[in-house]
Amino acid sequence: MAEAQVAAQFRFRILVVDDEPSIRETARVILEGEGYEVLTAADGLEGLRSLGKSLPDLIIADLNMPRMTGFEFLAVVRLRFPHIATIAMSGGYSSGEMPAGILADAFLQKGNYTIKELSHEVGKLLAASPLRSEGRKGDIAPLFVPRDNAGYLMITCPNCLRPNRLEAMSLNGGLHQTTCQSCGMAVRFEINHEIEPLVKRKDA
């Protein structure tokens, strides 16, 4: 009994991100049958929320999803969590080769891979334990001064990397906080008045 509890504590955790419930459930059943702990998310934004609660050892993500595509989601994962192994999946690429522009460690063509191939790819990536460095994850968003004179700031969310347009005529320099309009994360940002005028002059 004690040995089983110890084994359970050290199970690899896998996050499956796909907007099709049947695909998520099938992957969950297959991977749990292999002894993995499996979490699921319906799209990229839900996947980011899951990452905010607990980090998996490997992520499997569909490329074609609403709200946030797999291309966007995997790019965020590679930037913020470079140590996590990733597998991209899609049925939209007939060649079966890794589509250009995807930041993933492996690619599986939907509907054209076997349970054995999925298990092999997952096991291979987990055994390799990607040697990418952890990388620094800043929690203060970079600030981009607008090109117009309407008083808006463009703030890139450090969680989902999407820009947020913020009315900021009344804000002074220093640290501030807002809520990302895409993923709902509280975003801290800094207004630096030494940099701001330089950017405005450059854009003028």
Image: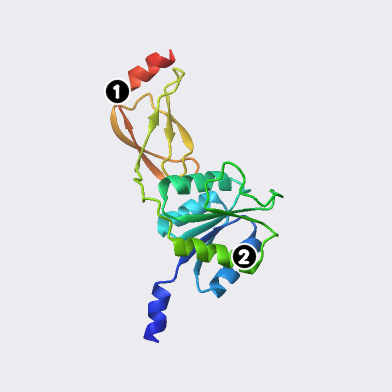
Amino acid found under the numbered disc labelled 1: His
Residue ID for mark 1: 193
Q: Is residue 175 left or right of residue 38?
A: left
Give the alpha-carbon distance from disc 2 to disc 1, as whole Å: 55 Å
Which image quadrant is residue 142 in? top left
Q: Is residue 93 left or right of residue 154?
A: right
Pinpoint residue 190: horizontal percent, then vertical percent: 32, 33
Q: Which residue is farthest bottom?
A: 1
Q: Which residue sits at x=44%, y=71%? A: 11
Tag 2's secondary structure?
Answer: helix
Residue 184 visible to the viewer: no
Residue 200 visible to the viewer: yes
Q: Which residue sits at x=60%, y=56%? A: 18
**Camera-side residue: 4 or 130?**
130
**Camera-side residue: 67 or 130?**
130
Residue 125, relative to residue 11: is it above or below? above
Residue ID for mark 2: 117
Q: Split into 4 quadrants, where in the image is the C terminus?
A: top left
Q: Residues within 10 Å of mark 2 (few under 14, many from 20)?
A: few
Residue 141, relative to residue 57: is it above or below? above
